[in-house]
Image: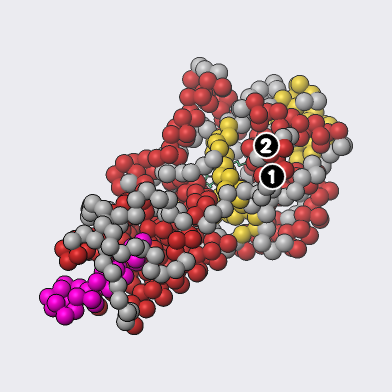
Amino acid sequence: MSKPFYITTPIYYVNDRPHIGHAYCTIVADVVARSRRLMGEEVFFLTGLDEHGQKVQQAAQAKGVTPQQFCDEMAPHWEQLWPKLLISNNDLIRTTQPRHKLVVQSILQKLYDAGEIYASEYEGWYSTRAEQFLTEKEMGPDGKFPAEYGEVARLKEKNYFFKMGKYQDWLIGYIRDNPGFVYPDYRRNEILGFLQKPLGDLCISRPVSRLAWGIPLPFDAGYVTYVWFDALVNYVTAAGYGSPAFERNWPADIHLIGKEILLFHAGYWPIMLKAAGLPLPKQIVAHGWWTRDGQKMSKSVGNVVDPVAVVEAWGADALRYYLLRELPVGSDGDWSDANFKLRYNSELANGIGNLLNRTLSMINRYCDGVVPQPTAPEPVDDQLRDAAMTVVNDYPKYLMNMEVHQILSDISLLLIRRGNLYVQECAPWELAKDQAKRARLNTVLYNLAECCRFISVLLTPFIPTTAEKIRLQLGLGNNPASFADVQRWGGIEHSRPIGEVTQLFPKKQ
Ligand code: MSP
């Protein structure tokens, strides 16, 4: 059996409220997943929740509930968000699930048995208030730690360490030899730069006295495992580690992440896999960060964009369109309400909405609501067809290169704009005045319907609800869109009635 295309998002901290940055990452992954499915590939698309650690333990304590109860109360915010954003994930993993605990423990045991994990005394500056060891990075120029850490004392503690350092040279070589492993290139350079400094061994345990909310080390019940060790393993848990499904699903094709967690994914994770004797993911794709009106989004500033509020006001498709259209995967983006409205009105309402509406209204008016039969094409028809075929031909290439932004801008700028221009150039309302131009009118309206059909297929991964509406209005029924349907221009059947015409994107301010 062939392997499904396996794409993941980071697992989000369950204690956070979902915001536009989380939505962005998951929507990009969704567009890739849906595009692959459109091309007939089987896809396994995973997202999930990161539920262990200090913050959850503290938040639960503050609320007077158990950490598990707290997670169970928070998880639905996330589980209910994804359908609202039309996310087509196949699985949603929670790190508190028994399936995950078993896998984390089995990998820890395997590494321990192989001598990859050892116990050692660690001595350092410990802040009881922050409940963590501090390093020189936190130390002020006066050699003291900032007041927010409270009392800081020397502490000696036994912990378990993963022999990460010995794999450093191997990893550098791997990243050098596999230029596609980290995308975009500038992130690959960043990680290679980072690997100039010694990685050292990784402390992978926390004594239960300090942190109880974690997965116990299988070989020492006095400790739980470090959250990142636990979190990264989610990708193999969901792939079915320990069962026959794993052979089929693993390795992941793409781990999509935000740029701030690159070191964990392109540094720690490959080394963990290598030490455990498992194949590496094919690619780590790091996207940029969204700001709002040039400012970092934060709860305290109160400028966080809430994806649910945007969906309620504008619809999920408008949100998806804006996030995807605005920037290439990798670059940082800046959210502005004004820009959002501008894109909505100019590209969705005036662009796609208008093209479909004009096309169908004219088919109703001049052809009794039936797709007309075309005759010999003129050069302007060929231009429209060529634009459509160019977008189709470039789609897989851009998809393989993670340039999903380019696909959407081509659909918008090459095809939809071309379609609207075609209407202006051919002026069907003029043709309709002259009975002798009937055949030409039919050809023009046929081509417009065909153009809308292409658009409906190509837009399916980006704005699935709208794409389906276009198909229904064109009279294509409920047949799911497929990339195979846009390999040839002229596929829309003539002499078939169109559906009921409604507005796709009402103009709004
Ligand atoms: N739990 C870890 C990830 C573990 S993966 C094994 C974590 N979670 S998180 O809730 O903080 O989510 C991080 C991800 O959310 C980022 O990698 C990024 O994809 C997304 N974003 C969070 N804020 C963002 C922006 N402002 N802009 C874009 N995406 C950002 O880290």
Residue 89 is covered by the magenta coloring = no
Task: Name, please, the residue furthest toward the front.
Answer: 495
- Between residue 184 and residue 477, name the one nearer to us: 477
Q: What amino acid type is highlighted by mark number 2?
A: Gly
Which picture quadrant has residue 306?
top left
Look at mark 2 in the image and give the residue it sits on.
Answer: 240
Please tell me in which quarter of the rendered image ligand 1 is found.
Answer: top right
Residue 436 within the magenta-colored segment of the rendering: yes
Which residue is under mark 1? 248
Residue at 73 percent across and 59 percent down: it is 175
**Which SS class for mark 1?**
helix
Percent x, y for residue 99? 65, 29
Kindly check if marks 2 and 1 are in contact, taking CB atoms under 8 A apart as contact. Answer: yes
Mark 1: few, some, or many residues within 10 Å (few <14, many ≥20)? Answer: some
Q: Pinpoint residue 90: horizontal percent, then vertical percent.
A: 54, 40
Residue at 58% in and 32% down = 94
The residue lying furthest to the left in this view is: 433
- Can see residue 240? yes
Crowding near the residue tagged with mark 2, few <14, some 14–19, many ≥20 C-alpha atoms within 10 Å:
some
